[in-house]
Amino acid sequence: MEVERVQTLASHGKLHELPSHYIRPAHERPENSEALEGVKVPVISLSQPRELLVKEIFEASKEWGFFVIKDHGVSPDLIKKVQAVGVEFFDQPQEIKEKNSNDPSKGAFEGYGTKMIKQDDQKVEWVDYYFHLMAPPSKVNHDVWPQNTTYREVTEEYNKEVLRLQDEIFRLLSEGLGLEKETLRTHMGGDDIEVEMKINMYPPCPQPELALGVEPHTGMSALTVLVPNDVLGLQCWKDGNWISVDYFPDGIYIHVGDQIEVLSNGMYKSILHRSLVNKEKTRMSWAVFCVPPGQKTVGPLPELVNEENPAKYTAKTFDEYRYRKINKLPQ
Ligand SMILES: O=C(O)CCC(=O)C(=O)O
Ligand SMILES: [Fe+2]
């Protein structure tokens, strides 16, 4: 199946005007929805006394649903390697990359992908991506991973670090709600939690003021653990404004997702975010989604629901949640 790759389109170099399906509706265009100056996202050091740390994570997750962590123990060298093997994949000749292409229309979500237009008036994002599972081991298929030399070694190492961070953040978020430490992790599926890697590749865009790399959305995951390259573009929606997220060289960016908002009965917020693209530079980001297994039913935790605080969300399996989210149906 022939798919128009954004990277191919951008590499022609003669493209001065965007094809119409990349031009966002007027109100969504970056030129009409500029970020507010002077507001900074929360940055939290993991190496501070536990009580303070729990409080900072609680506040950031309640007020923003987003924070950047530092002193997290993931070696900067490992992050650089993760980025290098991702760049290496996209640098390969097109015909090699196409060997790994996915086909969502056939239920094959893993692999190299680009969203396609299904209706004439549909707008698409200025991004190609690579998507695959990293955990649990029983669901990982290495055949659908990039096949370049050290990709697997580096990504397996990174997966261990992401799992460590994920478990720690679940503990901190549980403690913030006054719950037993393992509560959120257990309700997200424990060892069956699925960890998905999505490498976003946003090539230079001739008219970045009209396009979006990723349109405004909240993550359907429990948590997203993200590292970008040094090209700015991520923006978070806070109190009615877009806020640009700075680049933090060794920072890891944590998004609270929909499943944590539901479990916490709205105490923690799933952050609305989007990404912008750049006229000269390639932006990339490595987004890891931690999601419950499809059959897991997720609803507000009984410990957090009472007469004054009735349940704000309906419990449903994650498969059903995902189906509704993808098809833009009410939850
Ligand atoms: O590229 C980014 O910074 C954000 C990507 C994102 O939001 C996503 O892949 O869900
Ligand atoms: Fe996202």
Image (cartoon, rainbow, N blue to C red):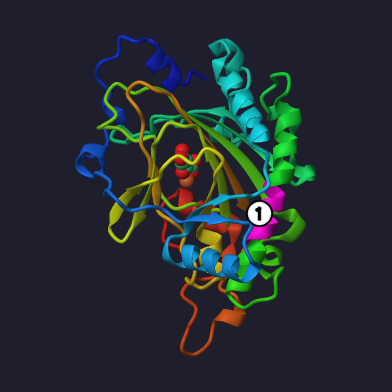
Q: Amino acid at mark 1?
A: Gln
Q: Residues within 10 Å of mark 1 (few under 14, many from 20)?
A: many
Q: Is mark 1 within 8 Å of ligand 2?
A: no
Q: Is residue 62 left or right of residue 112?
A: left
Against 200, residue 255 (above or below) is below
Give 275 or 53, whichever is nearer the viewer. Answer: 53
Give 70 or 174, whichever is nearer the viewer. Answer: 70
**In the image, what residue occupies the spot 65% across and 67% down?**
50
Residue 66 shown in magenta? no
**Residue pushed farthest right?**
138
Q: Residue 136: x, y in percent?
A: 75, 47
- By secondary structure, the bulk of the magenta-drawn segment is best described as helix
Residue 166 shown in magenta? yes
**In the image, what residue occupies the spot 79% across and 44% down?**
138
Q: Is residue 49 left or right of residue 305?
A: right
Residue 293 visible in the displayed image: no
Residue 327 visible in the displayed image: yes
Against 262, residue 214 (above or below) is above
Region rendered in magenta? 162-169
**Residue pushed farthest front?**
48
**Residue pushed farthest bottom?**
307
**In the image, what residue occupies the spot 25% across and 32% down?**
209
Q: In which image quadrant can residue 231 be found? A: top left
Q: Residue 253: x, y in percent?
A: 52, 47
Give 323 or 269, whichever is nearer the viewer. Answer: 269
Q: Residue 140: x, y in percent?
A: 74, 39
Secondary structure of the residue carrying tag 1 is: helix
> Which residue corresponds to mark 1?
166
Q: In which image quadrant can residue 199 be found? A: top right
Q: Residue 327: x, y in percent?
A: 44, 49
